[in-house]
């Protein structure tokens, strides 16, 4: 700092020496100090708000990664919530309907949640550790829910076809007021050949023109079972079931026509290789004749069933 200061006097056009007092000198020093402090504050402010330090940049990167992980976890949780909603809907409207059970109350499915403050004071490292564990569990839960959903899809298809499957099983008597069986299933004497042969159905004696009814839902087959059966109807029921109604006087359905259980399909007669007016009725499962007596269970009482069962056991002459 110079020891002397000079001032230019315009009147005399000369430089005049200025004597500085202590007060004036103090003001100058104070002004310089204040300017320095102000400049320092401005620099600090600019550095704080506009210039990121390496540590701040690292923290920002970690925060961004943490935010991305949280967003991904929330997205997976949203998907799981949708899958659970679908499972709950099926539980209420499909499976519980099958078993005639009441739906689960909403108060049990969605209880009031108490605010949890256990994680409010977590450190960054603890938060990362918890997030990693939660993400792993969410992945495992997603896989388990996917497997369970596929299982429920299969069960739903089975449940939806339950009524269709039951309707395809021959379950009623082909003739109304049918209480005895003239000739049963198994080894019986042939009415024409007079030899003991395998009888693939049951014979029910009835007056000519007695109505015959389909014993299950099905479609009239175009297949010809054979001339020995005379006028007949073969029904394809699906689920590996068929029924045959033989020796009819006439039919009331056509090949390819769909019929319902209990629908009229023809009338009793004695056509084909027959020794009297009757219905020859067969139940075929997986291409093999089975005993029809075991399929009467809808329109029959225990007493009526026992009567049919006893009469079917007699080894006698078949009517066809």
Image: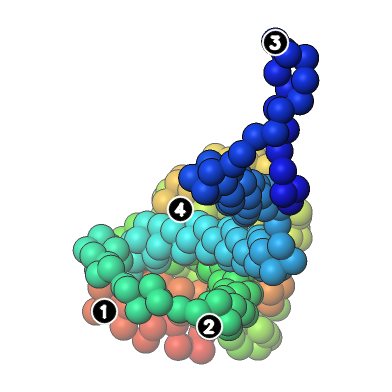
**Label 4: how many Cα within 10 Å (few below 14, some 14–19, many 20+):** some
Q: Which mark is residue 11?
A: 3
Q: Which mark is residue 205?
A: none
C-alpha span from label 4 to label 2? 68 Å
Q: Nearer the viewer, mark 4 or mark 2?
A: 2
C-alpha span from label 3 to label 4? 134 Å
C-alpha span from label 1 to label 2? 72 Å
User: Label 2, on which residue?
Assistant: 126
Q: Nearer the viewer, mark 1 or mark 2?
A: 2
Q: Nearer the viewer, mark 1 or mark 4?
A: 4
**Label 2: how many Cα within 10 Å (few below 14, some 14–19, many 20+):** few
C-alpha span from label 1 to label 4? 21 Å
Kind of element beneath mark 4 = loop
| 279 left or right of 296 in image | right
| 131 left or right of 227 in image | left
Kind of element beneath mark 1 = helix
Q: Nearer the viewer, mark 1 or mark 3?
A: 3
Nearer-N-terminus badge (1/4): 4
Nearer-N-terminus badge (1/2): 2
Q: Residue furthest front?
A: 12
Q: Position of residue 309 (x, y in %)?
A: 39, 83
Q: Are marks 1 and 4 in contact (CB under 8 Å)?
A: no
- Residue visible at 70% across and 57% down? 52
**Label 1: how many Cα within 10 Å (few below 14, some 14–19, many 20+):** few
Residue 67 versus residue 309: which sits nearer the camera?
Answer: 67
For the C terminus, which image quadrant? bottom right
User: Label 1, on which residue?
Assistant: 302
User: Label 4, on which residue?
Assistant: 261
């Amino acid at each position: 700092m110079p020891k002397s200061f000079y001032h230019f006097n315009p009147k005399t056009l000369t430089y005049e020496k200025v004597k500085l007092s202590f007060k004036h000198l103090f003001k100058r020093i104070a002004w310089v100090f204040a300017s320095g402090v102000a400049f320092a504050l401005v620099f600090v402010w600019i550095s704080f708000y506009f210039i990121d330090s390496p540590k701040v940049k690292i923290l920002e990167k970690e925060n961004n990664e943490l935010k991305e992980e949280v967003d991904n976890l929330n997205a997976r949780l949203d998907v799981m919530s949708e899958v659970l909603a679908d499972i709950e809907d099926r539980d209420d409207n499909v499976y519980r309907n099958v078993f005639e059970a009441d739906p689960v109350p909403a108060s049990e499915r969605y209880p009031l949640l108490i605010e949890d403050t256990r994680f409010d004071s977590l450190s960054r490292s603890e938060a990362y550790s918890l997030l990693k564990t939660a993400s792993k569990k969410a992945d495992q839960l997603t896989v388990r829910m996917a497997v369970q959903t596929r299982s429920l899809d299969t069960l739903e298809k089975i449940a939806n076809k339950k009524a269709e499957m039951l309707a395809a099983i021959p379950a009623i008597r082909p003739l109304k007021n049918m209480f005895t069986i003239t000739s049963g299933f198994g080894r019986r004497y042939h009415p024409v050949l007079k030899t003991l042969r395998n009888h693939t159905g049951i014979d029910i004696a009835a007056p000519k023109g007695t109505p015959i009814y389909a014993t299950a839902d099905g479609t009239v087959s175009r297949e010809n079972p054979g001339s020995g059966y005379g006028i007949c109807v073969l029904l394809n029921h699906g689920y590996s079931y068929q029924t045959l109604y033989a020796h009819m006087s006439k039919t009331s359905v056509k090949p390819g026509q769909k019929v319902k259980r209990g629908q009229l399909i023809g009338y009793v007669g004695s056509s084909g290789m027959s020794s009297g007016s009757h219905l020859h009725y067969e139940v075929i499962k997986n291409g093999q004749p089975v005993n029809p007596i075991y399929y009467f269970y809808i329109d029959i009482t225990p007493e009526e069933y026992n009567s049919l069962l006893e009469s079917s056991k007699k080894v006698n002459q078949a009517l066809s």
